[in-house]
Each structure stands twice: as C-alpha cells, then as structure tokens.
Amino acid sequence: YITVMIVSIPISNFNESHLYFSDVIKNIVISDSTFIRLYYSTKDLTTSGVFISFPLNVSSFERTYNKIKCNFKTKLNQNVITALINIEKEIIKKINYENIQPVFSIKEQLEQEFIKLFNLTNYNNTSVITLVCKISGIWNNNTNYGLTCKFYPVVKYDHPVSDSSLSEVFK
C-alpha cells in the first residue's frame, strides 16, 4: 500500500493572514511565465501550498481521459462555492499585479457546475464527498495571472494494522 497523508484546512477555518509568498521564479509548467509558490503558515505548521478541505454534494461522475469530472448543482453547494470563490479572490487580491488581468479559474470551473478530480480510481455516485483543493501558487504570463490548483478526493483507507498490534509497537 502507498499511503499519503495530506494536512488540510477545513474551508471554514481558512484565514488569509496565514498566507505567505515565495520569490518569483521561472514557471516550468507554463512557458514564458513566472510562478510564485504559496505557503500557509500558522504557529504550529507550515505547508507548501494551501490544502483546503470541503464537502461537496455530487450529482454524478464522468470519466474524461485521465480525470474524473465531478458534477454538482450550485443550489445544493452554495456556501462551499461562495467560500471557494472568495478564497480565490482574497489570494489574487494579495498579489494585485498592475495592468495584468486576473483569471479566476476556480470561479469559472465552479460556474460550470463541475470539478475535475485527480487521482480518483474508485468512485461511485455517493451523494456527498469530501474534496481537497490544493492551491500551489500564482502564475503570471505578463497578460494574465491566476492560481495554480488541483482538486483531489479524500479517500479513507483501512490500515492493515489493528489497534491492538499498534499498542505492542509503542510499548
């Protein structure tokens, strides 16, 4: 088994005062552009990127190439959608490049009532799932700028070690 642990912030606990930015570097994903890595730092923890968890009421899933399209209805998810759009606006507002147009890609995707998910191999038509939005940083191509982000499902795995065997390990 490969297990990955991601520390995420519940969407209701996001606080823009914990955002920090690295120096501008050359973007290796988008040609002729720059990238600023985003950090989220509290007194207890610093993460490279911001990981925001939230519940989503899902209407259906569709496989499209190597991604899963997670369809939803705005009216059933209005609070989460509003919070995600506001977080995107807050982060972009902190950079505020002059004479360069911001691109609100999270907002644009949510307005289409779907989210593209990465790393989801097993899915069913569960009505409510928990997702993590990973915001890595901000790209800038001197015409536009916006957030680099991906959405991942939270998948709970049953660990093969029982609680009783763990007590033996930690004696």
Image (tube, rainbow, N blue to C red):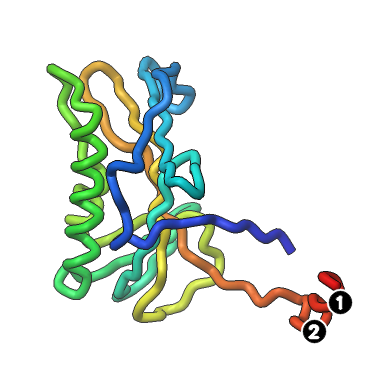
Residue identified by numbered label 2: 164
Residue found at the very far bottom of the displayed protein: 164
What kind of residue is marked 1? Glu
Q: Is residue 74 above or below residue 37?
A: below
* 171 vs 142, nearest the viewer: 171
The image quadrant where one finds the C terminus is bottom right
Classify residue 90 by image quadrant. top left
Residue at 39% x, 18% y: name it. 24
The secondary structure type at the circle numbered 2 is helix
| x, y percent for residue 89 | 19, 42
Which image quadrant is residue 23 in?
top left
SS label for mark 1: helix
Report the residue at 86% width, 77% height from top. 168
Cα gap from disc 2 to disc 1, whole angstroms: 7 Å
Q: Amino acid at mark 2?
A: Ser
Q: Disc 2 vs disc 1: Cβ atoms closer than 8 Å?
A: yes
Label 1, residues with CA under 10 Å away: few <14, some 14-19, many ≥20: few
Residue that mark 1 sits on: 168
Residue 56 vertical position relative to residue 138 in the rendered view, above or below = below
Residue 66 image offset from top left, x and y in percent = 50, 53
